[in-house]
Amino acid sequence: MACNLEFIEFVQTQLESLNLGTVLMRKMFGDYTIYINGIAVAVACDNCVYIKPHTAIDTLMSDAERGIPYPGAKERYILDVGHKTHTEQVLQTLLDVLPPPKTK
């Protein structure tokens, strides 16, 4: 099931309020890839935000629920973007360790 527009608008508003950089939501097959400063940090599927596991955030996400965002995908953390402080910590940590986007 695809994300509904209200959920996507909520996620975008929450992420933009963190002032981590430019937030872009790119629609793909009814779901969305979430980019911050051109770096893919999450996917939104079935009205949930999924974060790919990374050693840098394992401690921050140790109590997080896990799920599979779409058929064929590997298990990911589910991020509750309603908890702004935690979301900011997780995303800032990812932005610090993930490689910058490749220039075309």
Image (cartoon, grey):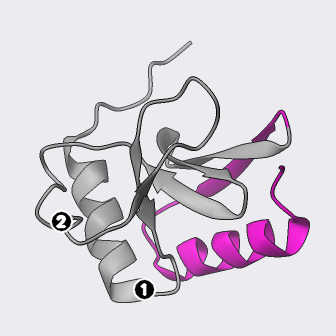
- Checking the image for residue 84, the label placed there is 1
For residue 63, side relative to residue 86 (left or right): left
Q: Total of numbered circles in the picture?
A: 2
Q: Residue at x 26, y 72 (%)?
A: 89
Q: Residue at x 37, y 42 (%)?
A: 52
Segment tinted magenta in the rendering: 1-29
For residue 68, side relative to residue 83 (left or right): right
Labels 2 & 1 near each other (Cβ < 8 A)? no
Q: Which tag, 2 or 1, sits closer to the chain's start?
A: 2
Q: In this picture, is 22 found above or below 18?
A: above
In this view, the residue in front, 75 or 85, is 75
In this view, the residue in front, 67 or 29, is 67
Q: For the residue labelled by badge 2, is the local secondary structure a helix, a strand or a loop? A: loop
Which amino acid lies under the numbered mark 2 shown in the image of this protein?
A: Ser
**Is 8 within the magenta?**
yes
Residue that label 2 marks: 62
- Report which quarter residue 15 is drawn in: bottom right
Q: Which quarter of the rendering shows the C terminus?
A: top right
For residue 6, side relative to residue 50 (left or right): right
- Checking the image for residue 27, the label placed there is none
Q: Nearer the viewer, mark 2 or mark 1?
A: 2
